[in-house]
Amino acid sequence: MQLPQAQLAVLEAASADDAQSVDALAAATDLPPETVTGALFALEEEGLVAVSEHVDESISLTEEGETYTTEGLPEVRLYEAALDAGADDTPAQMGQIIGASGLEGPQVDIALSNYARKGYGAIDSGELTADSDAEPDSDPEGAALSAITGADGDGGVAVDDVEVDGDVVDQLERRDLIERQESTTRSATLTDAGVTELMAGVETAETVGQLTPELLTSGDWRDAEFAEYNVEADAEERHGGRMHVLRRTAERVKEVLVGMGFQEMDGPHVDADFWINDCLFMPQDHPARTHWDRFALEEPSHIDDLPDDLVERVERAHREGVGEDGEGYHSPWDEDFARALALRGHTTSLSTRHLSGHQIGEIEPPARFFSVEKAYRNDTLDSTHLLEFFQIEGWVMADELSVRDLMGTFEEFYAQFGITDIEFKPHYNPYTEPSFELFGTHPTTGELIEIGNSGIFREEMLEPLGVEADVMAWGLALERLAMLVTGAEDIRDLHGSLADLEFLRNAEVIY
Amino acid sequence: MPTVDIDPDELRTLADVTDVADEELKDDLFALGLEYEGETEDGDFELEFAPDRLDRLSVEGIARSLRYQYGEDRGVYVPTTTEADWTIRVDEAVPAERPYVTGAVIRGVDLDEESLDSLIQLQEKLHATMGRNRVKGAIGIHDLTMLRGAPATEGNPTIRYTGVAPDGERFVPLDSDRELTPGEVLEDHPTGREYAPVVDDYEAMPAIYDDLGLFSFPPVINGRRTEVSTDSRDLFVELTGTDQWTIDRMCAIICYALDARGATIEDVTVEYADPSVAAAAIEESDGRDEAGGSDEAGGAHGEAGSGPDEAAEADTGAPTLVRPDFSTKTKTVSHDRIESILGIELDPDEVQDLAERAGLEAETREETAVEVVSTIDDADVADETVRVYDVTIPPYRVDVLHPLDVIDDLGRAYGFNELAPNYPEIGTVGGRHERSRREEAVRETLVGLGFEDMLDFHLIGEADAYDRMGVEPGTDVLGGSDPARIKNPYSEDFGIVRPWALPSLLLVLENNTHRAYPQDLAEVGFVAEVDETAPTGVAESRHVAGVLARHDAAYEDAKSRLQALCRAFDVDLETPPTDHPSFVDGRAATVVADGDAVGVIGELHPAVLVEHDLEVPVAAFEFDLAGLGAE
């Protein structure tokens, strides 16, 4: 008979008397183990070899288990701290003992839940007692961990190789301190048929590795036998090109807004405080305008180019208010301060520029505008705050708008992202009245979280800008929406030069 | 956002709602705009407040709002005051930067630890908000029994607000047991050091004297002699500041809180030696000193203000003021505007009811349309009459600037969450900005060429942008232009707006040397440089940058991708050789798109790679997005 080369080599290496493992056969034939396994299955199907399987169970320590082999089990540490505090005599304050034990975070709960279970003492109304008869040194779980770590090689240790009670192993597994792995060893022996065929003589069949242009053009492919591949094996890892996950989220937002009839705005990142704050009726001594919140520019520091008539109207609104019954702020107003340049703290500067008619010409109602652009704030850099973030900004202008229109618009927007049940919390902004913070329920945690800020622009803001219609507006951080949608826990993974390529490569595509 | 700590039990007592459970209380507070943030160690609620309703910075103020919400109180309430005994005299030596003063005498307070803490918290929160960290207004509260007025002057006991040289006086400040000069307080006392910047530019130090000497050094610290304790029964409240209105409003909020605790408020006379200061003070006031008086709204709770309504005259001839200023103000709001903003129809009775539930009072009348303060411009209504409301605003409401603010109050009383959302039927056409569409098209093409799209910070360290790339600032190469520099950066690593994008991509490579290669990264992103001809002095543009980091990366890898990109946008690409300090000599070229030099391409210099801890070669390019189409 004829057999492919690999199968023949395996058949020749196998023995009728001793079962040989895949590894042994691989060594004898100089073939990769997966090829040997494939060949064995083929030979078994032909009835030439018998394949037997043996399952080995091994255990290894988890990272947490590893920690406890050096630091000791939390409940033991708690017990020792309790003894030091004299809790075997009189009950002692739990907080103090925990402090003394050095336990932190989730370890505290672990220690407390195991403490009583093991009979180390009792916990009652915030006080701990310690049972002086307890013997933590002979704690079976601790001993088992040591035994496992002592015998542990690279891939864990066979269950049979450590003298540990089965119940203790189960308990350790429940505590996530160890992991069990199973591995299957296959061995093969020649069958009688196999011996007979070998005696009769087996030839190598011609097999083809790669299909070549020559094979195709010559027609030789008709007689070729194709070597079998292990089609289950993992292939080389590929990352390929992909769009940044936050960029995709931004694109999704833009798509939704365009679909709702909004036009995109564009404008400068570095801008005069006049457009960023003064036009928004933000008093110049507002805490958010102090130097430590905004990124003022050192060079260049001031804008030359501002429309004089608008500056005058804005100043008057700040000083005197707008309308018969209006009042201004009892705050200083200095044109030089308004001319100071900064990185915009919100993209509402784009809205003021557009509403003023100075960006793309006069805008007549009805109109809807939006931007998804960066804003900059001198905040703390941590898992929920960045120095620069994308702000979704949108506004609607019409002759008459009510808070019900505002609510309906935002409900529609957030529903596109699966956020329903929006709550509107009455809020204060210097530039809107009424104002609302928008809250939504996190889809997985069920927590109520702030997802935006909104309101109807004040007349003190619109009148100087020359807008006679009503304008309602809202803003929110894109990163916050992205965290909601992607479940990301650290905003820095999503955005910026500190990004981890692994995170970006594994992030689920947003659409 | 600022927070205020409130004992929930005390809140229940003051609001008269002992049977409201914690969760319900939290919901009711949320409806007021006070978000529950957590609990303090003592079990107090930590509430986040929006900085408009400064009258809610204390448990007393929040309780008052709850009482209105629960319907326990209605309408405007103005506390009754008793006739002035004490006088504050502001003399000529007062610091010109801080000439204004106001105050009140509080009799019969019953302070325990809890209520004293609450009073101190209110004082501190007012300092932080309306007082702009004591710059605009600062409050001093003193034990009245420790003060000695001058009996020699005609009848009334008097204290004196003046200015002294930094070393011109000695007194024992709070939290100290030795006598210090104001100058020494600013240098040696912890509170003094904290607030020294407020008085840094003052020519003289503000000082308040009684017969025994200096007892207050506003806005920095009080003297120890008059320290308030739980034993104090009568208090003297003084406020100094940079304008009369601000300190009068802060004073009203303090007085309302103490009034809610059952104390009696007694007027104080304020005399300004400088007539121009006195005139400015009256000008800024909300009305008490105007002829004819104000205090029209007595409210359901009694007569407002018992002091003289008309300004009297001091010895100097300047008018005197009677404080605290509890005068109310009036805003006129039209019925149409209320309905158009809230999006519902209301009866006049309902509006008046909502106003009373909001702690306001609304008188309604009809008016000819032309006089109405409204934004609805309809020329045909000149002959029609429309309904308006004259709404009375109590003196603790510092946030009401415009009739719109009254409408917001009415909406809150109605319950905004009771309103049915409505999607407005307004037809508009949506669309993207051209620049944003072009960026997106380039990104898609880059991704098709196998690049991982990056989104880097626009702020970068100066060293990252220049030194570590081998580039000198102010040189005529890509990335060499002068940067827009931040005055107060978060840290050196974020000191400038990036003038080019490759340094950002190098940072990503540097942070990811443990991740699998190849790392083919690209970004279409924002860059900026100083440019005097730009309207803001800063030229902003978008650059296209790409890096190919792999064990065999070479010039050709970058060039082939750049060629494909240019072909996709129908742009002719030429790459004449050039020198660029970030690239290997002889392996760098200018990117010339349709005849314009727009960027650079090449193999990055080994010194740049080593500087970023890279052990693989990197081929790279960067050019102005404008090269791929008209900007």
Image: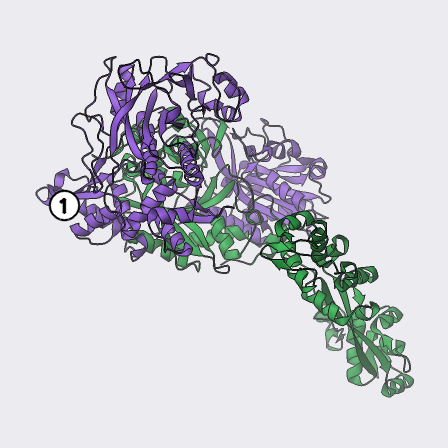
Chain colours: A green, B purple
Residue A313 position by quadrant: top left
Badge 1 density bin: few <14, some 14–19, many ≥20, Cα 10 Å: some
Q: Which chain carries label 1?
A: B
Question: Label 1 sits on what residue type?
Answer: Arg
Give the SS element for disc 1: strand
Residue B400 image offset from top left, x and y in percent = 28, 38
Residue B622 located left or right of residue A119: left
> Residue, x 45% and y 40% (percent of image)?
B631
Residue A378 image offset from top left, x and y in percent = 50, 36
Along the line of sight, which residue is nearer the eye, B551 or B427?
B427
Along the line of sight, which residue is nearer the eye, A229 or B364?
B364
- Please indicate, yes or no, whether residue A101 appears anywhere in the rendered image: yes
Along the line of sight, which residue is nearer the eye, B226 or B411?
B226
Residue A94 image offset from top left, x and y in percent = 63, 52
Q: In which quarter of the image is the N terminus of chain B?
A: top left
Residue A346 position by quadrant: top left
Find disc 1 in the rendering and name its residue: B387
Residue B116 position by quadrant: top left
Along the line of sight, which residue is nearer the eye, A471 or B558?
A471
Tell me: residue B544, above or below residue A511: above
Residue A324 image offset from top left, x and y in percent = 20, 34
Residue B66 located left or right of residue A384: left
Tell me: residue B476, above or below residue A193: above
- Please indicate, yes or no, whether residue B437 appears anywhere in the rendered image: no
Question: Which residue is farthest left?
Answer: B383
